[in-house]
Amino acid sequence: MLTKKNVISSILSLGLGFFLVWLILYFTEVDVEQIVASFYSLNPLYAGLAIAALIVHTFLTAYKWGLVTQKLTPDNQQPLKFYLFYTTLGSLTMQFMPQYVGMVMVQNLALRLHKISSFSKGFLSVVYDQFFNLLIPLLLFPASFLYVLGYISLSVAVFIWISTITLTHFIINKWHRRLISFLIKALAWLKQLKVGKGEATQTKIATGNDSILGKKFTLYLYWISVVRYLVWIIRGVLIAIAGGFKIKLWAVAFISPIVQLAMLLSFTPANLGLMEFSWIGLLGLFNVPDASAVKFALMQRFLYIVAVMIILAVFAVVSFIERFALFTPKQN
């Protein structure tokens, strides 16, 4: 719930984020005119493809959240556009508060506002969904870290990535129930800390093959998460190409998991300033000039916001048309 304290905290963190960006521009000697010029010089084809990849990524995020929620609340189904709208709204909210806080807050409010689930099940569906969002970059982090620091070669890093993703499939296939039961117990413990020991309620979760604990459903969520993250990496590569930056495409791919996990420690909206610092430092290991790294990082943020606004604009137009059709008298 938003309070005066939370609003003030968000404003201060947003101000800190802009201050960090100013520091970056000051010390790298990149001025605003150069950044604006780089936006105008974007390759329209690859920029469009990058925006399309971001829209697909948002769609997959919404689809996965919808699957989890519908499994927990089979009697209260909502169309995909419901989850897509609130996922996009959460993406917009993240620009004003720490990334995962903004998304979780909007998802929780959406489920409670529309009375889709109880507090317990709503909490579980949101956090369980976010767990899969974090799982893939977490799995890819070790190989990414070693490759970026130059401890392993590109071929070894790619092999570890593929092996890790494949091995995780077999681990889930064999021990999925134990792993997810442990996760749910951990989530219940967190919920208990949040609502107080005396107020905590027991969340009963079905354990059949058609539940969120089912093997097929768990593996389905896992591979959706893998595809979703692959789309995210492709988005970064497309942005690098669109901007004409001399950045190795593998550098973008392997730095992405590191930057994404760093967002967990973020205290600025959408990791503003800190994300840019991360990209500058890590791309510097690949001999990428600071100016190119700054432009690339800011271009990612800019195109992300463009994609979010496009989705919300489509929703606004569709909503207007539906309302207009509702009040238009039918012709006999």
Image (spheres, rainbow, N blue to C red):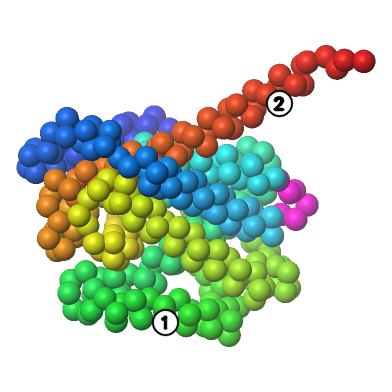
Residue 329, quarter of picture: top right
Quadrant placement of the C terminus: top right
Which residue has dot 2 on it?
322
180 vs 103, left or right, is right
- Residue 75 is inside the magenta segment: yes
Residue at left offset 73%, top offset 73%: 208
* 66 inside magenta stretch: no
Q: Nearer the viewer, residue 226 or 82?
A: 226
Looking at the picture, how far across and down is residue 145, in whole percent? 25, 71
Rendered view: 104 above or below 233 = above
| Label at residue 324 | none
Which mark sits nearer the N-terminus, 2 or 1? Answer: 1
Give the magenta range. Answer: 73-78
Residue 172 in picture, x, y percent from top left: 55, 79
Q: Residue furthest right?
A: 332
Q: Which residue is mark 1?
A: 163
Residue at image x 68%, y 24%? 321
- Specify the amino acid type for callout 1: Ser
